[in-house]
């Protein structure tokens, strides 16, 4: 069972399940900052590159199974399945929301 997620996070997760890059980008703020795997990605252009080079080729789909609110962030955890070594890998995603968009996201394994 998928936990109830705030609208922008739910939209991102749904688009990710379809490997839809445009849909994945839509809930992010224009000046978003994403920290993932030691990398820093700012804005839609860098985030699109991340999705097109890392998520889509690996068919990496995040399946949230828990959500909690902590220090002003929405913390979502769950496995990511795909065509990559070690699949599935459990990730923790810390979302910062602002004006019904994802302002920041930090992803850790």
Image (cartoon, rainbow, N blue to C red):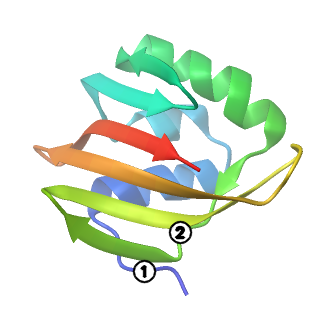
Q: Which residue is rendered at x = 19% and y = 47% of the image? A: 97
Q: In this view, does 99 lie to the left or right of 49?
A: left
**Picture coordinates of residue 17 (x, y %)?**
64, 56
Could you say which quadrant of the image residue 102 lies in? Answer: top left
Answer whether labels 2 and 1 touch (C-beta < 8 Å).
Answer: yes
**Picture coordinates of residue 6 (x, y %)?**
27, 65
Earlier-in-chain disc, 2 versus 1: 1
Secondary structure under badge 2? loop
Mark sitting on residue 3: 1
Q: Which residue is rendered at x = 71% and y = 21% of the image? A: 53
**Picture coordinates of residue 16 (x, y %)?**
59, 49
Crowd rating for badge 1 (residues with CA inside 10 Å; few <14, some 14–19, many 20+): few
Crowd rating for badge 2 (residues with CA inside 10 Å; few <14, some 14–19, many 20+): many
Q: Which residue is rendered at x = 45% and y = 50% of the image? A: 12
Q: Is residue 14 left or right of residue 41?
A: right
**Camera-side residue of 30 and 103:** 103
| Residue where numbered disc 2 is placed | 64
**Picture coordinates of residue 59 (x, y %)?**
79, 44
Secondary structure under badge 1? loop
Could you say which quadrant of the image residue 1 lies in? Answer: bottom right
């Amino acid at each position: 069972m998928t936990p109830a997620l705030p609208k922008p996070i739910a939209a991102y997760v749904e688009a990710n399940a379809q490997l839809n890059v445009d849909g994945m980008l839509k809930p992010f703020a224009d000046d978003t900052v994403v920290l993932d795997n030691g990398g820093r990605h700012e804005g839609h252009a860098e985030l699109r590159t991340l999705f097109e080079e890392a998520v889509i080729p690996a068919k990496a789909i995040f399946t949230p199974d828990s959500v909690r609110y902590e220090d002003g962030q929405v913390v979502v955890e769950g496995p990511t399945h795909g065509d990559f070594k070690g699949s599935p890998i459990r990730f923790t995603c810390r979302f910062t929301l602002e004006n019904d968009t994802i302002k920041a996201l930090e992803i850790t394994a």
